[in-house]
Image: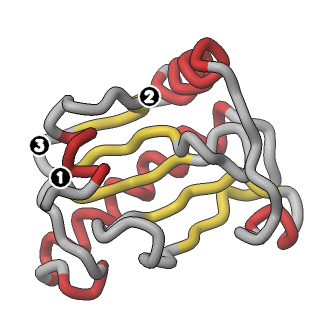
Amino acid sequence: MSSIFSKIVAGEISSHKVAENENYLAFLDINPLHEGHTLVIPKKEVDYIFDIPVDDHKDLWAFAREVAHAVGKAIPCKRVGVAVIGLEVPHAHIHLIPINSVQDINFSRPKLTFTQEELANTAEKIRSEF
């Protein structure tokens, strides 16, 4: 059974993409902790991030690094925090979250809600920083 992220990769579910290449995809989280909260995934479905082959794992993090720089330029913040939890969706993913304090990356906090138009505008701001 395909994960929701595999369905996004296949175009079966829409997303607000911020970056993409042949092997990796970055898109906005629909339940963000902060504006610009972005998910970075390998297009190939692998459940656990540490099961990704070594070279692909390095390439995923290099891609995430580029995305994090764009997020940090587009969204006012002190840093772009990184989290890999791996329990919510059985598809490896990296959370890139604009933060101003350590509390901003607390996943027990209530998630924010943005309209589709707001998400589209945020995605465009990030894309424009590449």
Question: Along the line of sight, which residue is nearer the eye, 97 or 7?
Answer: 7
Contact (Cβ within 8 Å) of mark 1 with mark 2: no
Q: Is 25 left, or right, of 89 in this rendering?
A: left
Image spot of residue 94 (x, y percent): 44, 64
Chain-order first, disc 2 or disc 3? 2
Q: How many marks?
A: 3
Chain-order first, disc 1 or disc 3? 3
Residue at left 81%, top 56%?
A: 110
Task: Check residue 16 in the rendering and tell me which mark sits there, or answer none.
Answer: 2
Quadrant for the N terminus, please: bottom left
Residue at left 42%, top 39%?
A: 27
Q: Identify residue type, mark 3.
A: Glu
Contact (Cβ within 8 Å) of mark 1 with mark 3: yes
Q: Dot 3 corresponds to which residue? A: 22
Contact (Cβ within 8 Å) of mark 2 with mark 3: no
Image spot of residue 18 (x, y percent): 42, 32
Image spot of residue 9 (x, y percent): 20, 41
Chain-order first, disc 1 or disc 2? 2
Instruction: Work out whether 113 lies above or below 66.
Output: above
Q: Dot 1 corresponds to which residue? A: 43
Q: Under tag 2, what secondary structure?
A: loop
> Quarter-wise, where is residue 47 in the image?
bottom left
Question: Along the line of sight, which residue is nearer the eye, 84 or 101?
Answer: 84
Q: Identify residue type, mark 1.
A: Lys
Residue at left 40%, top 57%?
A: 64
Q: Residue furthest front?
A: 1
Q: Identify residue type, mark 2.
A: His
